[in-house]
Amino acid sequence: MTAARAHDQPTRTAPTRSEVRLLVPALVFVALVVAAVASLGTPLVTSVATTFQVSLDSAQWTLTIALLSGAVATPVLGRLGAGPHRRATILATLVIVVVGSALTVLPLPFAWLLVGRAAQGVGLGLTALMMGVARDHLPEERSAATIALISVVSIIGAGVGYPLAALLAEFGGLRAAYGLGLLVTAIAFVIAWRAMPAAPEGRSAHLNVAGALVMAGAVFLVLFLAGERSLWSRHLAVAATLAVVAVLLLFVWTVSELRTRTPLVDVRAVRHPAVAGANIAMFVGGSGMYLLLTLVTRYAQTPHSAGYGFGLTTFVAGLVLIPFSVLGFVAGKLTPLVRMRIDGPLVLAGSAVIVGGGFVLFATARSDLAELLAAMGVLGFGVGSFSAAMPGVILAATPRSETSSAMSFNYVVRSVGYSLGSAIGGLVLAAGTATGRLFPDEDAYTTAALVGVAAMAVTTAAGLALARRRSPGTDPSTAPVGVSGPGRSGRTGG
């Protein structure tokens, strides 16, 4: 028995059936709410610009700042969630999100709206903590499916929040749309206060404050440089200097994490072939997945005067995301069953192939709105399956006590990948926009789709490489606690 196994096993609690019935929907609801609330900025950028009389670039920060704060907060919350005060961490974080939601509703200046959106983004770090609670407190047969579902709803939350926010903004104004965020986050806090159990006894987690600050600076610079495309075209020297600073900060952080006894992220565990390979797949795959999502929604809203597009309103364009959310949810429910028969890395590879099919569909057939809906459905199914399988690949090499920390690092990788995907899409479309024209040539969308196909090919290769590394003769009993081998009905962690 490994040290991690000996440590984790005696602390496992045995919840009653009624507690399980309450805990599972609570975990899923909190994960869905924080994802949906963080995505509220996407359909409201134009409304923010007109309401506060700021530029579209400034209004875009209502989305960017939420993603930035989420990426910075996620590893910190993951480390705190690995200790004895996980319940307090969850509740305190939700209080921050509720206060931030209130700031977005109150008639305050634009700067306060950004503060509120940053506070809402902090909630993105709760997803990994929800997985840690599931792994610690749910029975063997429920844990894997619940972790997979949490991972999926953290992705499809954008598809839920986008059309609702757009509808409220269209009929009730900007404050009504943000009021939705305040309502659901308040409900999430009440549910978490009622349902979240305390962490198992014997846990400890010390926060390396210096390491947290260095990593926060590095992640901020990486995401900032990925999102600020104009900085690269207008101030290349500044952008290059900031990129060098980001690399240096990441190097300093890595050295610091290896030397400290209380690392923010267990870098040695991250170097495990399965964990490293899964994070590479998440980074490249996340870039491609978010690229297609942005391409389809932008194409749908392009007016007919550009020679293509459908000229959809923000609300109707949001409805295009419904197939993405529905099929993503379906894939998330099916994937744990598939994982009983197919190894996790192979599921990742297959999911990447499905997403690549969505790119091919978009590249070759987008003259009809039904074709866009089909592409979004294929994307949703692939993303749902990919997201549901990812935790199992990582947690198979992770002790139970490190669940939140390991998954929080994966979500930082995902955030960086998403930002890169958005930046790549913007750069390709900008390159395809003729001087003096507002919209890119339609061929630019095809080029961007082919870039996405290449990204998903790399992701597929990463999944296949992981599968080849997995020893077919591995004894499941040597896996970390709560993790069973492929094809077994025991817990897989996802």
Image (tube, rainbow, N blue to C red):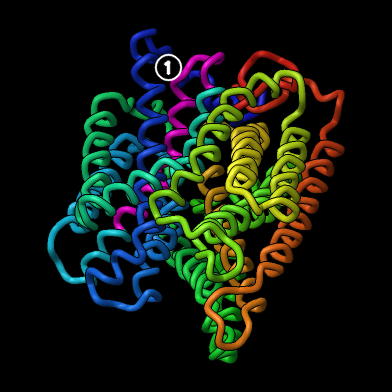
What x and y, as percent, mark residue 21? 38, 14
Vertical side of 107 occupied by 26: above or below: above
**Majority secondary structure of magenta residues:** helix
Residue drawn at the location 31% of the way across and 34% of the way down: 87
What x and y, as percent, mark residue 449? 71, 59
Residue pointed to by mark 1: 13
Is 125 inside the magenta-drawn segment? Answer: yes
Confirm whether residue 403 shows in the render.
Answer: no
Q: Quick one: 486 or 398, which is closer to the camera?
A: 486
Give, as a single range, the part of the protein colored magenta: 119-144
Tell me where residue 339 sits by quadrant.
Answer: top right
What x and y, as percent, mark residue 453? 76, 54
Vertical side of 216 occupied by 238: above or below: below
Q: Is residue 226 left or right of residue 137?
A: right
Is 132 inside the magenta-drawn segment? Answer: yes
Vertical side of 1 occupied by 266: above or below: below
